[in-house]
Image: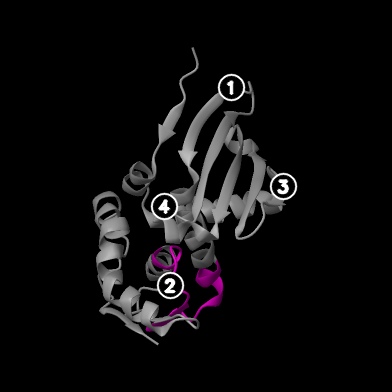
Amino acid sequence: MTQVTMLSASQISHLLDMPAVIDAVADAYKEKANHPATLWPMVYEQLGGEADMDIRSGVLASKHVFGNKLLAWFGENAKRGLPELNGLVNLYNSDTGEPAAVLNATALTGFRTGAAGAVASRFLANPDATTLLVVGTGSQAPYQIMAQLCVLPKVTQVLLANPRDAKKAQAAAAQMPMTLEKLFSQTIRATNSATNSGDQFSGCRPN
């Protein structure tokens, strides 16, 4: 009988460390450029009002896996005390078609999107930069910050800006060190002690 791995958001956050995710995303980009990996057309639907969904899928031949990710965004969920993003990633064996895993897409998307920015910074950012500016204070912000700290080891200060609401920037800046420690730093130190875990950064302040 086929065994299917199922991982929640909290399990993903404890199992993944950002440096490893950055390397995996970089490898996936290389494989896409060289064609062992293929993305299939995205499906997108507006669900009316402040809501939509999309399905992204593809195959990674070198790992013998294909899969899809369905994300649903409901902008009014914050007023309901619910997360705006929800979704699942489904993975399958590309040799047999057997299901391999069902993963929480929200947590995985946070890691992947943050890692994608860090891959770009490896090649394009000033390696001696000491200050990082992040525009936006939503759920993606801590993933972007930690990913950048992993590839820009001289950054000691993070500026957070929210063009729509300065008070949100102040609140996010105050909470960010604790958020980074909880989501990433402990895992990075436990699994990859030779890699920067963000301990060099002195804190965030609103911009």
Three-letter code, disc 1: Glu
Three-letter code, disc 3: Val
Q: Which mark identifies residue 137?
A: 2
Q: Earlier in the sequence, mark 3 or mark 4?
A: 4
Tell me if label 3 and label 1 are in contact, CB under 8 Å. Answer: no
Is any atom of residue 128 visible in this view?
Answer: no
Q: Is residue 101 above or below residue 178?
A: above
What residue did someone put label 1 on? 98
**Count of number-bearing discs:** 4
Is residue 123 located in the magenta-colored stretch of the structure? Answer: yes
Q: Earlier in the sequence, mark 4 or mark 1?
A: 4
Between 92 and 55, the one lying in front of the other is 55
Q: Which mark identifies residue 20?
A: 4
Estimate how packed mark 1 is, as few (under 14), some (14 to 19) or many (20 or more) residues with alpha carbons within 10 Å.
some
- The spot of residue 32 in percent (x, y) is 67, 50
Is residue 68 located in the magenta-colored stretch of the structure? Answer: no
- The spot of residue 24 in percent (x, y) is 50, 50
Is any atom of residue 67 visible in this view?
Answer: yes
Three-letter code, disc 2: Thr
* C-alpha span from label 2 to label 4: 24 Å
Which mark's residue is nearer the viewer, 3 or 4? 3
Residue at 71% in and 51% down? 44
Between 193 and 167, the one lying in front of the other is 167
Which mark's residue is nearer the viewer, 3 or 1? 3
The segment highlighted magenta reads 120-142
Q: Which mark identifies residue 43?
A: 3
* C-alpha span from label 1 to label 2: 39 Å
Instruction: Name the residue furthest right.
Output: 41
Residue at 70% in and 45% down? 38
* C-alpha span from label 2 to label 3: 27 Å
* C-alpha span from label 3 to label 4: 29 Å
Estimate how packed mark 3 is, as few (under 14), some (14 to 19) or many (20 or more) residues with alpha carbons within 10 Å.
few
